Image (tube, grey):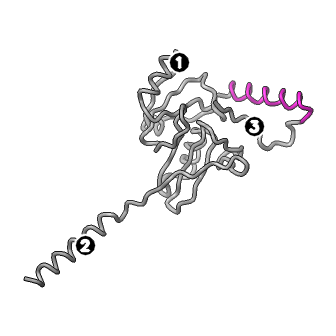
C-alpha cells in the first residue's frame, strides 16, 4: 500500500512538473529612447503608442518604431524563432500581445514609418476611435498576417519634407542620413 501511494505521489509530482514544460513566458522589454533603434529601419524607437517588439525564443528583444517594420522583419526572417510579439495600446501605451490586440488601418493615420496601422488592447476602443475620427477599418491579428505591408509613400515624403523644414529652421542639415526623427508621439 505504501509503495502504491509513493508511486502515485511520484507520478502526480512528475505530471505537475511536466505540465509547466513548454510554457515559457515572454515579457516585453522597456524602451530606452536614448539607445533603442528599430531592427528594420535603424531609426530611434520612441517610448510611445507606435513601439512594437518581438521577443525571440532566446529572450532577445527586437524593437520596432512602427508595426509595419515588425511585419517586414517577419517576412524577411520567418517566425520559427519568435517567442512572443507585443504592440502598444494606442491610448494607454500598455503592452499587449499582438495576437490579442485589435487594429485600425486608414491611409491617413500617421505612424512613424507611414504604415498607417495602430493597435488597441480592447476592440471597443478601436471601434470608438473609428466612430470618433470617422475613418478607419477594424483589423484582427490574422488580418495583419494576411496584409501586404507597404508604406504610404505620399505620407512618408510629406513627413520627410516636414522634418527637413524643421531642420532648416534650426540651422541643421538632414544630409548624411541617420535618424530623421519622424517618430510622432501622441
Decide if residue 119 is on the left or right side of residue 152: left
Judging by the rendered image, the residue that carries numbered circle 3 is 181
Q: Which residues are magenta?
A: 154-172
Query: Residue 63: horizontal and vertical position, in percent?
Result: 61, 49
- Say which residue appears at 49% left-offset and 20% top-offset: 130
The earlier-in-sequence mark between 3 and 1 is 1
Please identify the dominant SS of the magenta region.
helix
Q: Quadrant of residue 51?
A: top right
Viewer-nearest residue: 26 or 116: 26
- Alpha carbons under labels 3 and 2: distance apart: 55 Å
- Say which residue appears at 66% left-offset and 34% top-offset: 112
Quadrant housing the N terminus: bottom left
- Say which residue appears at 71% left-offset and 44% top-offset: 44
Judging by the rendered image, the residue that carries numbered circle 2 is 13
Q: Which marked residue is nearer to the observer: mark 2 or mark 1? A: 2
Residue with the most extreme left position: 1
- Say which residue appears at 48% left-offset and 36% top-offset: 144
For residue 43, above or below residue 133: below
**Mark 3 and 1 residues: CB-CB less than 8 Å, in contact?**
no
Q: Quadrant of residue 8?
A: bottom left
Query: Residue 29: horizontal and vertical position, in percent?
Result: 57, 52
Number of numbered labels in the structure image: 3
The earlier-in-sequence mark between 3 and 2 is 2
Residue 135: image tag? 1
Amino acid at each position: 500500500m505504501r509503495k502504491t501511494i509513493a508511486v502515485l505521489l511520484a507520478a502526480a509530482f512528475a505530471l505537475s512538473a511536466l505540465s509547466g514544460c513548454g510554457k515559457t513566458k515572454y515579457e516585453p522589454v522597456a524602451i530606452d529612447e536614448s539607445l533603442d533603434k528599430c531592427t528594420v529601419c535603424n531609426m530611434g524607437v520612441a517610448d510611445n503608442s507606435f513601439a512594437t517588439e518581438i521577443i525571440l525564443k532566446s529572450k532577445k528583444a527586437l524593437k520596432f518604431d512602427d508595426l509595419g517594420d515588425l511585419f517586414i522583419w517577419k517576412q524577411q526572417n520567418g517566425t520559427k524563432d519568435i517567442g512572443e510579439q507585443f504592440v502598444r495600446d494606442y491610448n494607454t501605451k500598455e503592452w499587449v500581445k499582438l495576437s490579442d490586440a485589435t487594429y485600425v488601418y486608414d491611409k491617413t493615420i500617421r505612424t512613424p514609418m507611414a504604415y498607417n496601422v495602430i493597435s488597441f488592447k480592447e476592440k471597443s476602443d478601436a471601434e470608438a476611435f473609428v466612430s470618433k475620427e470617422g475613418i478607419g477599418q477594424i483589423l484582427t491579428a490574422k488580418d495583419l498576417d494576411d496584409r501586404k505591408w507597404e508604406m504610404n509613400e505620399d505620407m512618408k515624403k510629406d513627413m520627410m519634407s516636414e522634418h527637413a523644414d524643421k531642420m532648416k529652421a534650426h540651422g541643421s542639415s538632414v544630409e548624411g542620413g541617420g535618424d530623421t526623427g519622424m517618430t510622432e508621439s501622441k
